[in-house]
Image (spheres, coloured by chain):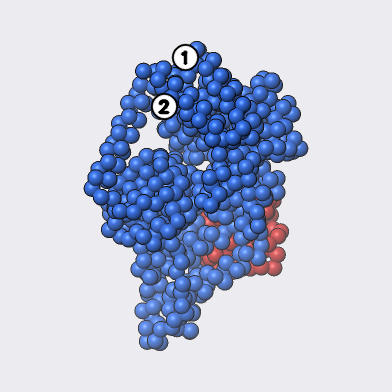
Chain colours: A red, B blue
Amino acid sequence: MSRHKAQIPVEKDESLHLRPMQVLNERALEFKSDLTLTRDGHTADAKSMLELTLLAGKKGPLTLEGRGPDARDAVNTLSALLDQQLNKR
Amino acid sequence: MERFKGIGVSGGVAVGDVYIIESERMIVGRRTIPPDLVEDEIERFHDAVAKAIEGIRDDQTRLVPRLGEEYLAIFDSHVRLLDDKMLRQSVERRIREEHMVAEAAVDEVLREHVKLLFEDKSTARWVSDIYDIQSRLHRVLMGRSTGDLRDMKEPAIVVAEDLMPSQTVSFVREQVLGIAMEAGGTTSHTAIIANALGIPAVVGLRGLTAEVRAGDRLVVDGGAGEVVVNPDEETAARYVRIEKDIVESDRRLLHEQAPLPAETIDGWRTALYANIEFPKEVETALENGAEGIGLYRTEYLYLEKGREPTEEEHFDAYKSAAEAMWPRPVVIRTLDLGADKAAAGGGRETRSEPNPFLGCRSIRLCFEREPMFKTQLRAILRASIFGYIRILLPMITSLAEIRRAKAIIEEVRDDLCSEGIKHEGDVEVGAMIEVPSAALQADTFAEEVDFFSIGTNDLIQYTLAVDRSNPVVSYLFQPAHPAVIKLIKNTIDAGDAAGIPVAMCGQMSGDLSFLILLLGLGLRAFSTSPKVLPELKRAIRMVSIENAREVAAAVLEESDAAAALKILRAGRADMLQGEE
């Protein structure tokens, strides 16, 4: 059981559309670990698209946290994906 | 047999059986289930989710060939929202612990979520997505028809109180013979889609749904704005004949007019452009001989998704239109949402306005939400390298607005430059002339823009202070009103004096009754729905400018609309006679 964390900047608030969240959500479901995304004190389950939608109303960077057997892999993969989706890198 | 008079918004005649689409007003009572049925109820919920997802996938497959991939990404998001862990757990808990019926549980969970979404501006735009999945689940759970046309076995005439954008975009020309609707006006989404697909449609038919039931036959006469319920055989046969004649003469006209120039008898060239909604319509435009796109309405990019499109979605749409039309011009009008069209597209600021037509719409909404405006402008400038794109700014009322919009375009261009992104440096910018202040100040505006486009629907509405879709006052909507004609003349004169092109893209430009007048006033560019172009061209080829100028001079002498119309009718009769 391991725990991992990563922070992802959000350069433009308006980049938090349904699309990047949908991509994140789809990939998150492929991992065994529990995955949460936190922004400005508000936490959403990365495996729930509905919960993810609420993060667009918050401010600041996103924190991705994973707990479980594949937490390291999940956090690395998903934070890179999210960064690319949101900040077009 | 009963007749209803409404507003014809898309021409043509259709005769067929009715297909009634019920309005979405499902009320879920909070019923409970016996404890021993809990597991069955949970299973019923899971089945419903699976079926609803299947429904989305079906819609997606069906719509891709018609609308293109770019319109349909929204469906993927809806699948994710339905196949949701939180939704599943919360609904299951309510069924298991509170013995709630699945419908009520779904309703409560999603309602709470909507409440949270409404708490912030940036999340409120997704409320319509939640409503969409909610109604899909409800329909499956309650065994109701899907509300779109999947249950329609035979081609039929759609009758409804009102239609949601997601319903109208799923219309297929072969399946929907005609549309008869209680709500709506000429600028409603139903009107625009019907026009784009060439489906005869009449809207504003008060009391129709109360009189029509399944199994009835209906005539929809889009040209006359009339609907006949259960026509007798003779009447039905007459309409079938009219329908056939229209189809045949359209085909003949298209064939014979296509190779000819849009030139008057005395050799004056005019330019005929098409108004479009979707990039795919450029094909119809070209088939009908369009020399360019005079008005690309971009609202549907926003309406179809029920959210703001991404820069790439904008870009793909504009690029494909520009490439297909090259070297012909494509005039892209920036977002003209607000008023009646705003609610679905996420313009919630305008939804609650007491006076939306005088409120935050069009260019005002773009200024209000500058990041959104910039996204669209970036896409336009980027797409411009693939063809000949021009930018058209809607609802301009003052010089300051033109300057502000141009400054924003400049900023966007600088951003693109510094980011090293390919784009066209010099894109022409034009102004819609659709409010009296703009028409009166056209000479000043002409110094600031590269072209004008006269939008007659709004110009008439704002000049005469009348809402055409309000049946009580719609008689006041008079394109031939002297005040309207003077404003049009003033705009054309100002454009001529400054040497910038003036086009007209409103409904008046495709109305043959006004053709002689408009040519006489000096208008040389017309933009209409593609289907009207062959007929318009044929008419232009019968007019002499000399004669048109005389008619225009006579009309300008008149002090009321009725007298002006009389002159125009006589002028048109003369013209037709000259042909024979």
Where residue B385 sits, quadrant-wise, is: top right
Chain letter of the residue carrying label 2: B
Residue B293 visible somewhere in the drawing = no
Q: Name the residue under label 2.
A: B534
The outermost residue toward the left is B233
Chain letter of the residue carrying label 1: B
Where residue B198 sits, quadrant-wise, is: top left
Q: In this view, does B500 lie to the left or right of B72?
A: right
Label 2 secondary element:
helix
Q: Mark 1 points at which residue?
A: B265
The outermost residue toward the bottom is B35
Q: Which amino acid does label 1 sit on?
A: Ile
Q: What number of labels is visible?
A: 2
Q: In this view, does B172 lie to the left or right of B427?
A: left
Give the class, few, some or many, for how many residues have Cα within 10 Å of label 1's Cα (few <14, many ≥20).
Answer: some
Q: Distance between the residues labelled 2 and 1?
A: 16 Å
Residue B40 visible somewhere in the drawing = yes
Name which of mark 2 and mark 1 comes first in the sequence. 1
| Quadrant into which the C terminus of chain B falls | top left
Above or below for B161 versus B534: below
Q: In this view, does B408 lie to the left or right of B307?
A: right
